[in-house]
Amino acid sequence: MKSVCEVYNNNFGIRLSKLRMQKGVSARDMSLSIGQNAGYINCIENGRSLPSMKNFFLICDYLGITPNDYFNYQTSFPKKLSSAVDNLCHLDDDKLSHISSVIEYMVAN
């Protein structure tokens, strides 16, 4: 049976791989872009290592997401969701009610 650490380590890498592919970049390019060796992201995605806290923040920044978004496994597109929420924050109550009604209708159908 896998330990809790092994499960989180594996899930962390899977999540990183999905988010990186959504951005359309290679593991090598991402590694180099955040100032690491060419195989850094590959090692994380394959569960061989975990990033330091500093590098985790660099990864999130590179992906354009928050650390909270990273661990929100319920959404496949955290960047789009974060952007939508940011936009909703600028609406008045009337517009927000209309948007809410549209979303409820779309989810129900």
Image: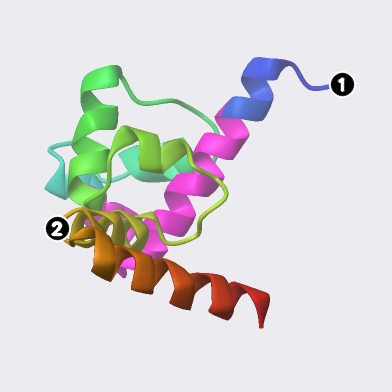
- Foreground disc of the pair 1, 2: 2
The residue shown at (52%, 30%) is: 48
The residue shown at (25%, 59%) is: 93
Residue 28 is marked as none
Q: Which residue is mark 1?
A: 1
Magenta run includes residue 15: yes
x and y, in percent, of residue 22 in the image: 38, 66
User: Is residue 37 at least partly visible in the picture?
Assistant: no
In this rendering, the answer to whether 27 lies above or below 47 is below
In this rendering, the answer to whether 11 lies above or below 1 is below
Of the pair 90 and 47, the residue shown nearer to us: 90
Residue range corresponding to the magenta coloring: 9-30
1 or 2: tag closer to the N-terminus: 1
Residue 90 is marked as 2
Q: Secondary structure at mark 1?
A: loop
The residue shown at (55%, 70%) is: 104
